[in-house]
Image: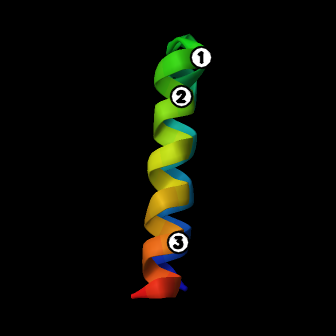
Amino acid sequence: MDGNTEKKKNEEEIGDGRKKMNGHARRIEEIREDRLKRFMKTG
């Protein structure tokens, strides 16, 4: 629980930077997370 709270806080802090990030980089990040989730399920 503490880890999730800490992660949320960090995401809020970098939120502004993420908005400035171009859509392409954001999409790559989403794909990377999606692959990681699939890998966790199959692994």
Going 56% across and 58% down the picture, which residue do you hit?
8
Residue type highlighted by circle 3: Arg
| Residue 5 image position (x, y, % from top left) | 55, 70
Residue type highlighted by circle 1: Gly
Q: How crowded is mark 1: few (under 14 residues within 10 Å), some or many (20 or more)?
A: few
Element under label 2? helix
Can residue 14 be seen?
no
For the residues labelled 3 and 2, the Cα–Cα distance comes to 19 Å
Q: Name the residue under label 2.
A: 26
| Residue 23 image position (x, y, % from top left) | 59, 16
Q: Residues at badges 3 and 2 in contact (C-beta under 8 Å)?
A: no
Q: Nearer the viewer, mark 1 or mark 3?
A: 3
Going 52% across and 85% down the picture, which residue do you hit?
41
Q: Mark 1 points at which residue?
A: 23
Q: Name the residue under label 3.
A: 38
Element under label 3? helix
Can residue 31 be seen?
yes
Residue 10 numbered tag? none
